Amino acid sequence: INLSHHPPLPDNYQPSLKRLHGTVRKLKAEGHYEAYQGILDEWLTDEVIEEVPPDELDFPCHYLPHRHVVKMNSTTPVRPVFDASSRENRNPSLNMCLEKGPNLIEKIPTVLARFRLKKVGVVGDIRRAFLQIGVCERDRNFLRFLWLDQNGALKHYRHRRVVFGVSPSPFLLESCIKFHLDNTLAMCEEGKLDWPIDFIDLLANSYYVDNCLASLDDVQQAVEFIDVASKVMAERQFELRGWELSGEVNSSVPTNVLGLLWHKTDDVLAVNFDSLMSVNTEKVTKKVMLSAAHRIFDPIGLFCAVALIPKLLVQRTWELGLTWEQEVCENLRMEFLDWFQDVPQLAEVKVPRWIA
């Protein structure tokens, strides 16, 4: 496909086919093939995907490789993940040919600040959010993928809905939600709808992609907000689910809220250090130290000073002229390991969600 001001986008068929065989082998070896097939069958029934008609197989197109991700504690333990960044040699990937939209990560501190503003915090998420947004027919052939069915037949499918993993997808979801809620708010202000205006305004400012975070003055108000929010979003087939509130008893497992851990019973927040603890420190290099620094996700700035230490150590490796894979000197190594071993203690530090 020839694009203006951009190298041509190839069909990516051969790389996708090669990776498909590897994916299927792994699925069968791990015993997940039937579950994966079941998801694709469900998508076909729900018109999330469709088989490419034989007379359209030669149309200009692009194929996305895919693989499985396993999360046994999830409602969908096995799910497909599509790689829109796949490329062969110097050819561009699909993501390289698309506008990503604004950086939505910058919204996280603001959304979290609103979540901490009032006495009762509430969180929910949209079920299969990306799959509620359709893709124009003319674009679907660029979202094709291959599959080997139970009889070993090669199937050509294409997506009818927005694909998680394609760079503009989060922005498209955010835009659709904003469009719906802006229209709803305008109609409420004009008296054409009788939803509480303050709830609609709160809902419109409570989203980060498919996550909804809000705070209200008391439990009764929170329950009313949940009811209104669920009904308003259902008007556009967005199913808000999994609502959780401050003060829930018998809730020993914290909830992940935009990267932070929310302990609902005590209504406190903590930083999640699990990703940091998985860093391999047998050989300490510049690359290892930088990786450790980037694994502390602290959007509300609880531990800015702590996260600064490995960055300063990385700065010293530059001054010493060390390469990314070169092991650091003993002094730097000990400073880094002292920091790394002390960090887990910070997991015990919790701050009130309600900033009042």
Image: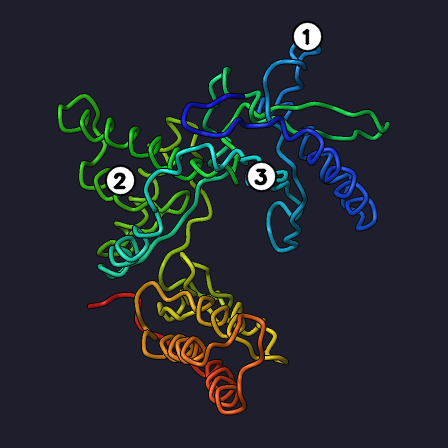
At 63% from the left and 20% from the top, the residue drawn is 50
Label 1: how many residues lie within 10 Å, few (<14), some (14-19) or many (20+)? few
Q: Nearer the viewer, residue 31 or 328?
A: 328
Amino acid found under the numbered disc labelled 1? Asp
Label 1 and label 3: CA atoms lie apart by 30 Å
Q: Pointer 3: what residue?
A: 90
Residue 304's place in the image compared with 240, above or below, is below
| Of the image marks 1 and 3, the number of the one nearer the N terminus | 1
Q: CA distance from mark 2 to mark 1?
A: 44 Å
Up/down of 334 relative to 203, above or below: below
Horizontal and vertical percent position of residue 339: 46, 85
Which residue type carries mark 2? Ala
Q: Residue at x 63, y 53 (%)?
A: 71
Residue type marked 3: Arg
Q: Nearer the viewer, residue 348 or 317?
A: 317
Q: Which residue is disc 1 drawn over?
A: 55
Q: Position of residue 355 (x, y in %)?
A: 23, 67
Q: Secondary structure at mark 3?
A: loop
| Secondary structure category for the residue under label 2 | helix
Q: Measuring from the top left, give residue 82's x and y in whole percent.
A: 60, 39
Picture quadrant where residue 308 is located: bottom left
- Horizontal and vertical percent for residue 199? 23, 41
